[in-house]
Every structure is written in C-alpha cells, then in structure tokens.
Amino acid sequence: MSTQRVVIITGTSKGLGAALAQQVLDADTTLFSIARGTNPSLAATAAERGAIVHSLQADLSSAEGTRQAQEWLQHALPRTAQQYWLINNAGTVEPIAQANQLNDAQAIQHALQLNVGSAIALCATLLAATDANPHAERRILNISSGAGRRSVAGWGVYGATKAALDFYTQTMAMENHPRLRCVSLAPGVIDSPMQSVIRQQHADDFPDVQRFLNLHAEQQLSSPDETAANILRHMGSDAFGSTLLDDIRRYL
C-alpha cells in the first residue's frame, strides 16, 4: 500500500464528491471512498493511474452507518503515510420548508447526522488514528455553504447544519492538534444532483427557487469537475488553513 498520501472522501457516488475522488487519484495516493451508492469508475481510474482505492458503501445519515465507516477506517488506515486528507463532502439540503412546516423529525435528524454528526465523528477517527505519527501532516476540509453564513428562507435545517459545521471547524482549529490544518469551505453553486432537488421546490417552501432556476437556465452553475479541481488545488497549497471559514471562489 502506498504511504505517501491517504485521502478520505465522503459522498463519492455522484456530484462534487465523485469529481473529487476521480481527480485526487495518482500513484502516490491511497483513497478511502465512503458513499451510500457505488462508483465503479473509481477502480478503473485508479488502475490507470497506479493509485489504490478502498470503497465502503455506508449511509452516513444514520448513526450505525457512521459507526461502520469509523470502524472500517480505524482498521484499514495505514499509520505511516506522510499526508492524510479528509474531505467531509457528503450532505443533504433536505428537508426544505418554512419553519412552521418543519415537522418531520426523522428528516431533520438525518440531515443533522449526515451534515454535522458524521463529519465530527470522522474527524475524530482520523485524528485518533494519526496522532501517533509524528511526521504526518493532517488536512481536513469540511464542505460548508454560504447558507450557513447568511440565512435563506426555507433552508432553516440546511443553514443550521452548515453553521454548526463552521463552528465545529473553528473549535477544532483552536484545540491542540499538532500538524493539523482544517477549513470549512463554501464551494459555490454547483451543477449537481443537489441543485436538481432545489429547483424542484415550490416557492411557498423555498422563495428563492426562481433564482436557482435562472442560474441553471443561464448556465451560471459551476461544473463538479471545475469546482473539484479548484478545491484540490487549494487544499494542496500553503494557503490552506490560513482562513478557517473560506469560499473557493476567493481563489478563482
């Protein structure tokens, strides 16, 4: 197993996560891919580039699925790599509704677990697994959103989870974790399956829906591949970690 760079990415079956997983692969990388769905093309790309991929199919919106991912990483992560990257990308924008209609406790619980709980748990797993390696550089990227920094009607749950992820990242950074750089990053508006969900909302639930319909119609959405390339470039740069609550559009 390559021990140059270990990369863990969640939500790799589609959208931004799939693009990140494809682009991070090289001969010095071992990728640990975690997703609810499958992405068979990762293995083919890894074989072409001389990379190694380990994949786990797990639902991080449940405590059991998150625990399964933690146990898998605890046993499988190599302990002698020079770099460890964790990209907490998996997330959901649902449930979308006005405050007086947010009555589906299970949907709320799933969003909190997927967007916040799983990220916190996987950060803990990575830090614990690499603390004993005095030469390992650790980089953690939590995919956040501008919705966590500016309230959007109908996104009470989504915005709250992203604000929580921002706060957690700031807390992790102030603690004593040697050789750690961490960032909570807004990736911009991406042409992804999440955007399809947003465009299907009724204006009564999500008053901003027309803005997203216009962005799509006017082809103003960033592609997953373009966004992934910008994110990975920044994550590998010396500037990574200097701004805790960041936005990838600052580096375009």
Image (cartoon, rainbow, N blue to C red):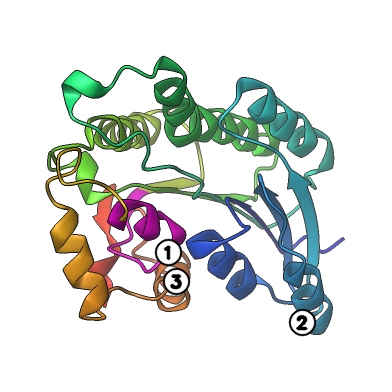
The residue where tag 1 is placed is 192
Q: Which residues are magenta?
A: 184-199
Residue 242 visible in the picture? no
Q: Amino acid at mark 2?
A: Arg
User: Does 96 sit above or below residue 47?
Assistant: above
Residue 224's disc number: 3
> In the rendered image, which quarter is residue 252 located in?
bottom left
Whether the residues at callouts 3 and 1 have beta carbons within 8 Å, the answer is yes
Cα distance in 3D space between marks 2 and 3? 21 Å
- Whichever of callouts 1 and 2 sits on the residue coming sooner in the sequence is 2
Residue 88 within the magenta-colored segment of the rendering: no
Q: State the CA–CA distance, disc 3 to disc 1.
A: 7 Å
Q: Amino acid at mark 1?
A: Ser
Q: Nearer the viewer, mark 3 or mark 1?
A: 1
Q: Residue at x 70, y 38 (%)?
A: 58
Numbered-mark total: 3
Which residue occupies the foreground of this view, 213 or 13? 213
- The span from disc 1 to disc 2 (Cα, nearest Å) is 26 Å
Residue denoted by label 2 = 49
